[in-house]
Image (cartoon, helix red, strand yellow):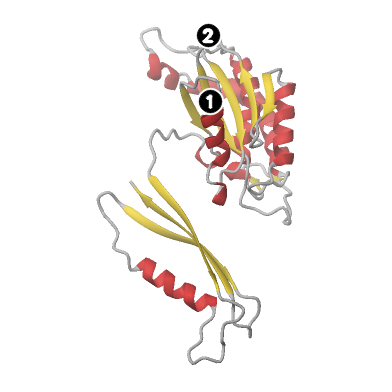
Amino acid sequence: MKIESGVKKKKSGMSAIIASLRDIKKELYPLREILLANLVMIAEIPAPTFYENERIRFIKQRFTEAGLQNCSTDEMGNALAIMQGRQSDKNIVVSAHTDTIFPATIDHTITVLADSVRGPGVGTNALGAAVIVTLPTILQRLGIELNSNLVLMGSTRSLGRGNLEGLRFFLSNTEIPIQAGLCLEGMQLGRLSHNSIGMLRCQIECTVPEEYDWTRFNAAGAIIIMNEIINKILEIPLSRRPHASIVVGSIEGGKSFDTISTHALLRLEIYSG
């Protein structure tokens, strides 16, 4: 099947592609079970940020089974493979981050229901990674041969303190000339985002020295100090044009009900755009 299947000749470019999506969806339905199998197998491999090794190994194995070229991992552990196009001098990166916010200690069993798939990290971003490893089969099914090479990538160290380190490393060190890129997110499949907002990610730690004199009047633990910091942050005037926001995403601290905390940790993100 060709991309223009079912499209009138007078249509061209993006309008032709959009018009052909209904036929493409029908053509790809038999691959549903392959995609779901890849999704389940990827999602059931724990991959907290900085510890994606096992998931990367599975993705690399899938690349090899698909007959892709240059299946490898780089110094950051990114899984890489090339799907050859007609023109070897042009390359498009298609990437999905492989790490998840869920620790390896929790149950990663995935449940597949008639109308949904449930489990830790399914949408962010096991589904994106599953699409990456299924993409060669999808294009083969549709009979699509691209002009450009596709550089398929399962990236590491994206979330939290990873700060997109895997993707940054690849783009800074690769000798492959890159003309364009797509990042796949499971929760965003079906929507094309062609711009983004600015984001600053912050982590604040408060540690009270062991020699601190707790007998002093109004002596406060780390949680109280962190609470004051949060109050100060929330007092910051925010721009409306462009719109800005502060998301206080996580706070940790303390060990028990009756012990003054000596350590607290705050994570937040600032958005503007």
Which residue is pictured at 59% across the width and 18% down the height?
Answer: 139
Residue extending farthest left: 241
Using the image as rendered, state which of residue 204 and residue 4 is in the foreground.
204
Query: In which quarter of the view is residue 27 placed?
Result: top right
Residue 172 in picture, x, y percent from top left: 52, 31
In this image, 165 relative to 38: left or right? left
Q: In the structure shown, which secondary structural element does the residue marked by tag 1 occupy? A: strand
Residue 93: which disc?
A: 1
Amino acid at dot 1: Val
**Contact? badges 1 and 2 (CB < 8 Å):** no
Using the image as rendered, state which of residue 64 and residue 70 is in the foreground.
70
Picture layout, residue 190 above or below residue 15? below
Which residue is pictured at 54% across the width and 80% down the height?
Answer: 221
Picture layout, residue 226 above or below residue 36? below
Q: In the structure shown, which secondary structural element does the residue marked by tag 2 occupy? A: loop
Residue 77 in picture, x, y percent from top left: 66, 36
Using the image as rendered, state which of residue 73 and residue 33 is in the foreground.
73
Residue 64 in picture, x, y percent from top left: 73, 23
Q: Earlier in the sequence, mark 1 or mark 2?
A: 2
Picture layout, residue 233 above or below residue 64? below
Picture layout, residue 29 above or below residue 159? above
Task: Report if residue 37 is visible in the image.
Answer: no
In this image, 234 relative to 166: left or right? left
Amino acid at dot 2: Gln
In this image, 145 relative to 196: left or right? right
